[in-house]
Amino acid sequence: MDKQFWRWKEYNWKEEKLNWKEARSITAGIDVGSVSSQAVILTAGKIFAYSSQRTGSDSPQSAQKAINWALEGTGMKLEDIQFIVGTGYGRVNIPFAQKAITEIACHARGANFMYGSSVRTILDMGGQDCKAIRCDERGKVVSFLMNDKCAAGTGRGMEVFADLLTIPIEEIGDLSFTVEQEPPPVSCTCVVFAKSEALRLLRQGWPKNKVVASYCSAMAHRVVTLLERVGVEKEFAITGGIGKNRGVVGRIEKELNVKALTPTWDTQIAGALGAALFAQALLEKTKSLN
Amino acid sequence: MPVAGVDIGGKTTKIIILEDHKILAKNLVLTGLETGKTALTAFQQVLNDAGLSPDKISKITVTGVGKKEFSLGHNEVSEVKADAKGTVYLFPSARTVIDVGAEEGRGVKCSPEGKVVDFALNEKCAAGSGSFVEAMARALELPLEEIGKLALISTQQIPMNAQCAVFAESEVVSLLHAKTPKSDIAKAVHNAIANRISSMTRKIGIEKEVILIGGMAKNLGFIDSLKKDLGLEILIPEEPEFVGALGAALIAQEET
Amino acid sequence: MLANYGYKDGSGDYYITIDTDKCVTCSDRKCIQACPQKVFEIITDDYDQEVASVVSDQSKKLKYSCAPCKPNVGRKELPCVLACEPKAINHSW
Ligand code: SF4
Ligand code: SF4
């Protein structure tokens, strides 16, 4: 693993009040992403426990660690889980998962649960990719796109910029709003070329906050054009690492003229949660077949 | 009377002073952050070398991505036009010019007179031009001159998955961690960029002779990978970086 | 579902859209053979439908893979688009 691009803590959580032993069904979803891995356990369709941690060098191990950590202190064992679905880029490499489902479908399903059935458009901005998803009231994907080729518009792009300007990444958002007047966006999309452009702007005497504002607005604009390809419909939700960067989110909301929903859960678990919900549905299906 | 061709690239600025098809002086400097200023200093330098005062230059034609920044130019020509002109002057049989500079890759199809028939660009994405190799050299902690040579001694083919200069840097770092020989990584880097350049060129149709110019035409590893990808021999002028400036100067000369 | 495979980078947008509602009605799967670059494969998607999708390592380099099919001069209808009977395939560039 090279650098840690988005500062977040490793954590686990459990619902102390639920008695899992009486639950009709126990399912789990595991999301092995390129940067972090999450596990969510559902008992009778309710969130019982979850965990989030850094992805290790291989997927099977990361998945194992994620589920172990979610199980920790619950008294539940891996064998107690009746159905497990894997998602994320490492999804095909989770030996104890019965099925693999793409992060797009899982994300939509998870967001539908977290934000309620009125959510139609989901933007997920991660450390290394960006996804735009439109879904129906059941969380089924209607249209999607992913951009994992280009670093512009991802956490990585922002990190490169933060490094260049020697500003801690978590301060970028607030700093970008300290300008009196919104500067024009950086004209180069490519992170490599935008870096040279930023250096030129600094040389011309632009203060750092202006350069930062200019980059945030370029990034917001770029993401909006991606969203437009899938179509933006209300309600709108933003998940993922950059979802925490007000400098970008605020500008996206402004450009689209819609407010993003406020999450009730940590949006980091959206993919794993969706996977666990798929697992639940698949379990019901196998039960009804028998 | 002498004329000047100025080519302001993303990385280097090139200037040629020409009189009756004879090069009186030339200069190559790093473009740096203050493009306009650098070009002016470089221009003064080249005039000194030629022993000329500015008023002796009858026409100054400017090209390159930074052409707008040069205050002394009389007119501007597109990079592809300058490339075609300069290349056909050096190689009358040239029909396809591949110019790979730091910020842009260009494929130009040209007529026997050195006019542009068609062109295609790899622009605005560093993965499609010389910047890609530069970034990878940095990740490998190798000077740019070394990375190309190193690729030639590679013994195994390894794939490069990332198609972005930024992500490819991390990929190179993890390959290094996995103890992959630098030469094999260098080879993969050059194969990747060669493939992007040859696909770009296929858009205009490849006709012989194929000439490679621009800064990357000095990179042996790239030349090797490009030849293999195209399945063709390619010709390279002695000073491939100067062809754009030469083309601009030739155009200036024609117009006076 | 409109499945968009591809990317946007500094130079532009390169997306192949597959309309899976149309694609699922297809029996011949001619796109697989028609594409000289082997861009497509048939998958069972997340909603258990058998449809075409873009091979994952191709989705990051479509601009280059498709370049020979898209010459500047004399561009014809794309082989994949031509082969697809239900008209499920669309290119953004
Ligand atoms: S030819 Fe068209 S419809 Fe048939 S499989 Fe391919 S994409 Fe689907
Ligand atoms: S344009 Fe050509 S290479 Fe691209 S997907 Fe269609 S058939 Fe394949």
Image (tube, rainbow, N blue to C red):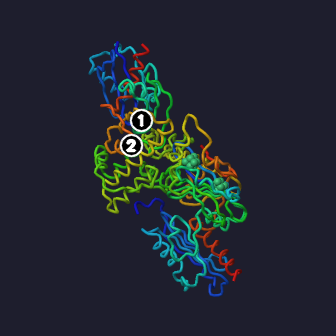
Left-right relation of C88 to A174: right
Can residue B187 be seen?
yes
Q: Which residue is mark 2?
A: B226
Residue sitting at x 26%, y 17%: B51
Residue sitting at x 33%, y 26%: B41
Q: Identify whether B99 is placed above or below A59.
A: above
Secondary structure, mark 2, is helix
Among numbered discs 1 and 2, the one appearing first in the sequence: 1
Q: Which residue is mark 1?
A: B98
> Which quadrant of the structure image shows residue B162?
bottom left
Q: Nearer the viewer, residue B96 or B188?
A: B96
Secondary structure, mark 1, is strand
Left-right relation of C13 to B198: right
Q: Identify whether B249 is placed above or below B140.
A: above
Q: Identify whether A287 is placed above or below B164.
A: below
Chain label for disc 1: B
Q: x%, y% of residue B111? A: 46, 25
Chain label for disc 2: B
Beta carbon at label 1 within 8 Å of ligand 2: no
Identity, as a three-letter code, of the amino acid under mark 2: Leu
Residue sitting at x 26%, y 21%: B49
